[in-house]
Image: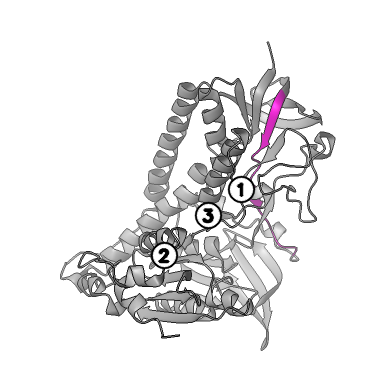
Amino acid sequence: MDDHYDALVIGSGEGGKFLAWHLAKAGQRVAVVERRWIGGSCPNTNCLPSKNEIWSAEIAHLARHADRYGIETGPVAVDMARVVERKRAMVRGLVDMHLDRYRDSGAELIMGTAAFTGPRALTVALNAGGSRALTAERIFLNLGTRPTIPDVPGLCDAEPLTNIEALELDAVPAHLVVLGGGYVGLELAQAYRRFGSAVTVIEHGAQIAGREDPDVASALAQLLEAEGLAIRTGTEVVRVRGRSGDAVEITVRDGGGEAVIAGSHILVAAGRAPNTGGIGLDRAGVDLTERGVIKVDDRLRTSAPGVWAIGECAGSPAFTHASADDFRVIRDDLAGIPRSTAGRLMPACLFTDPPLARVGSTETEARARGDAVRVAKLPMAAVLRTRTTGQTEGFMKAVIGPDDRILGFTMLGAEAGEVMAAVQVAMLAGLPYTALRDAILAHPTTAEGLNSLFSAVPAP
């Protein structure tokens, strides 16, 4: 068997698989080495599975509150086994779709664990048994990340859930304690509250959603607390006793001293670490940062000739859409087309209900840079579309620079991700905020609120 390839991709996540399919369709001999998740974490364990179960939770929430809309329903019960099976069916369909793409493109999928033996040479311990020695003209590292477990006494022994195990629960936890108030923690915390769990969120920082402006984080916390979530910020986890899934006691400390929180399950959502260990990157000549992230330039080239890195393992933002753009950067670099990761306008969306979406700078970031900014805010209740749906929670917020360009946009409200995309396009085009202020936007839509938001920008 000829085991020399034009291109080898290690890991089948978003950017890597698109690159493999692209190069294979262009006539190159390409292989992708994947340990377990065909298509990467997004369709298997992270983005899409979580949103699938979050949607089931939203249906349960709507059913419980149908009377608000004049609809009479009976008692609402959640069958977690069916919720999980719905998610699994979606995942199976996505895996089949990926296998079709591999067949159609001509890229080879090798299931196994890769380790470098030298520059652009590796061995793969095959999942089916045996091994293969592979070499390539070019290698692309799409290694991904994994959840981290904080070094807290008793926490590892408690066998806590990560997002992967939380999405496989076939029964509703009595009391879910979530360690971490970031994207994963908040999304799953609200979902399980809606499934029927008591939920406590413990965040070490001063606020949940730590990268957002304080007014945004505060409004989000109030919305979640109104649904019955208990949120403790500025709180350190001191030790853990018991076993997740049975009973746990979590000792915490804040400015008021120590307290014990009793729960049934622990979900750890306290960050992720790159999967760069144990693969022999030093033998390939690939340098890492102190955090274990692969060092790359703005075209995602590593320190080793002929080796690129893609996605979170390369320090790109932890979003599937960032990895997809990494693919475009490398694709164009290989074709000699100028493109880089510098200055990317990266959107983010937290899929709580209502969702939180942001693109560009926060007000805090802009003022810390010393920018002369103007800020406009608009409550969602002022958007007439929300009066028809009853989804009046939240607000829009825009940060405007001295040249009338939009520096940032944040929205906590129904359809936030879709509205954000309209603002992002305006920012990419370099339009002044007045273009959206004066645009003819369809009535009654949520995006129509942009007219009112940008009409509220203070005069210079």
Q: Dot 1: few (<14), some (14–19), or many (≥20) neighbours within 10 Å?
A: some
Q: Position of residue 143 (x, y in %)?
A: 66, 41
First in residue order: circle 3 vs circle 1: 3
The one nearer the camera, 3 or 157, is 3
- At 56% from the left and 40% from the top, the residue drawn is 327
Lateral position of residue 122 relative to residue 411, left or right: right
Q: In the image shown, does 136 or 280 lie closer to the viewer? A: 136
Q: Which residue is mark 2?
A: 431
SS under mark 3: helix
The amino acid type, in three-letter code, at marker 3 is Ala
Q: Which residue is mark 3?
A: 166
**Mark 1: amino acid:** Ser
The x, y position of residue 389, in whole percent, is 23, 69
Measured along the vertical axis of the image, is residue 265 above or below residue 19? below
Q: Position of residue 107 (x, y in %)?
A: 55, 23
The tag earlier along the polypeptide, 1 or 2, is: 1
Callout 2 amino acid: Leu
Determine if the magenta segment contains residue 148. yes
Secondary structure beneath dot 2 equals: loop
- Residue 51 on the magenta segment: no
Q: Can see residue 38?
A: no
Q: Do the residues bearing badges 1 and 2 touch, measured as CB atoms within 8 Å?
A: no
Q: CA distance from mark 1 to mark 2?
A: 22 Å
Query: Is 348 positioned to the left or the right of 68 in the image?
Result: right
Residue 354, image x and y in percent? 38, 68
Q: CA distance from mark 3 to mark 2?
A: 43 Å
Side of 204 relative to 78 (left or right) = right
Q: Which residues are magenta?
A: 136-151
The quadrant of the picture occupied by the N terminus is: top right
Q: Which mark is residue 340?
A: 1
Dot 1: element: loop
